[in-house]
Image (cartoon, rainbow, N blue to C red):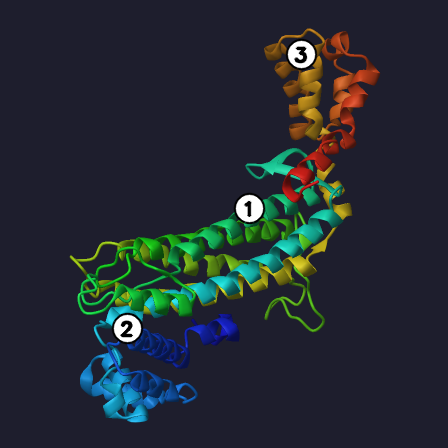
Amino acid sequence: MIPRYSRPEMVAIWSAETKFRIWFEIEAHACDAQAKLGVIPAASAAAVWTAKDVEFDVARIDEIEAVTKHDVIAFLTHLAEIIGNDEARFVHQGMTSSDVLDTTLNVQLVRAADLLLADMDALLAALKRRALEHKFTIRMGRSHGIHAEPTTMGLTFARFYAEMSRNRARLAAARAEVATGAISGAVGTFANIDPAVEAHVCAQMGLEPEPISTQVIPRDRHAMFFATLGVIASSIENLAIEIRHMQRTEVLEAEEFFSKGQKGSSAMPHKRNPVLTENLTGLARLVRMAVIPAMENVALWHERDISHSSVERMIGPDATVTLDFALARLTNVIDKLVVYPDNMINNMNKFRGLIHSQRVLLALTQAGVSREDSYTLVQRNAMKVWEEGRDFLEELLGDSDVRAALTEDQIRSKFDLEYHTKHVETIFARVFGE
């Protein structure tokens, strides 16, 4: 997590100031619930809230932690310095550190998810706009990197829209999965704190009570959350690689917007490189880097050990900040992507009609030729195009075996590009609705 790949709103979620503010709110809400139950004086609970508008001194907390070697105790000590030791003695009644730490982490992950969901909405809007814009812009479909059959640029955008829509649904589910809190005491038995306190704190913090916790909230929830971020990152890379391919000099069907004054190379002034999408490929790797550690965090000793803690202190901010930046960058790339329809047609015609081979194959079978023989007839003419630069249509028209089965008009009719776009509206209706 470095400033180059960070956006302020997501970074703020993971700041020390925000963390301590959430810790305070959890402790204060717990005091309110304890006071309502008669466990602590109402006046003491009210006194805790006098720190509501106080800016916690991060440096002072760090100073105390240097002695205590315990971050939550350091914070509670600093809170006592603000509200007074007499009132502070009722703070953290019956709670354990993980009640605060785990509930806070999940609050942060929920807030991060909300920003990421908004990011995805912006990306989906950009993909939909470009899909509609290029609904019938013919381009070459490729399999194994080789010309296959025609498709449209609109369908390319639409399939990425559909993929990102699935990812949005996954992220919404991951948000719900991780939106739990626990105020259940040292091993989750509520021995020294009433379950009503947990219910109150969770309601105030926008969480659901964890049905059963130990000293910690179960980490399978977090594993699912980070796995979802990893899937989204993979989809970002999927889209980025498509754009990188289209920007290759030999293809040049689309390219990243190249702004005035931008430089592509320190050595070669002519260069216009796909730097943003290459960057996205790299950022996707960083987000996925969090997935395996998150899964390994699921297995903890008995009611809890601390092996997950250092991992989460890093992957929480790093994965969410990086993904937030990547989604925003990808949205900008899609919004400004320069598309070259003429180059798409030129690329399609490089092999002089080969892309219509399946239609001729099917026409021959419909005319009574066996599939094996039909394939042989089409392939032998196609190979002349590959190897000798011939024209596929002319070769077919000059092949007596093909002409024995098909008339000239029947052959020529198989070279109609619009044939390949006849179901575009149907696909768009499936993706975007009627």
- Give the mark nearer the N terminus: 3 vs 1: 1
| Near-viewer residue (209 or 21) | 209
Given contact means CB atoms under 8 Å apart, are the residues at marks 3 and 1 in contact? no
Q: Which mark is residue 246?
A: none
In this orientation, does residue 22 appear? yes
Eyeballing the image, is 141 above or below 356? below
Return the x and y of residue 288 as percentages of the image width and height: 41, 56
Which one is in front in this view, the residue at disc 3 or the one at disc 2? Answer: 2
The kind of residue on which mark 2 rests is Leu
Disc 1 crowd, CA 10 A, few/some/many (<14, 14-19, 20+): some
Q: Quadrant of residue 181?
A: bottom left
Q: Position of residue 336 (x, y in %)?
A: 69, 61
Callout 3 secondary element: helix
Label of residue 365 in the image: 3
- Please name whichever residue, 387 or 272, is drawn nearer the observer in this view of the structure: 272
**Amino acid bearing label 1:** Glu
SS for dot 2: helix
What residue does disc 2 label? 37
How far apart marks 3 and 1 lie (CA) works out to 36 Å
The residue carrying pointer 3 sits among few (fewer than 14), some (14 to 19) or many (20 or more) residues within 10 Å by Cα, namely some
Q: Which residue is mark 1?
A: 163
Left or right: where does residue 289 sit relative to residue 96? right
Three-letter amino acid code at the position of disc 3: Thr
Question: What residue lies at 19% left-to-right and 84% top-to-bottom?
Answer: 68
Q: Residue at x 33, y 89 (%)?
A: 59
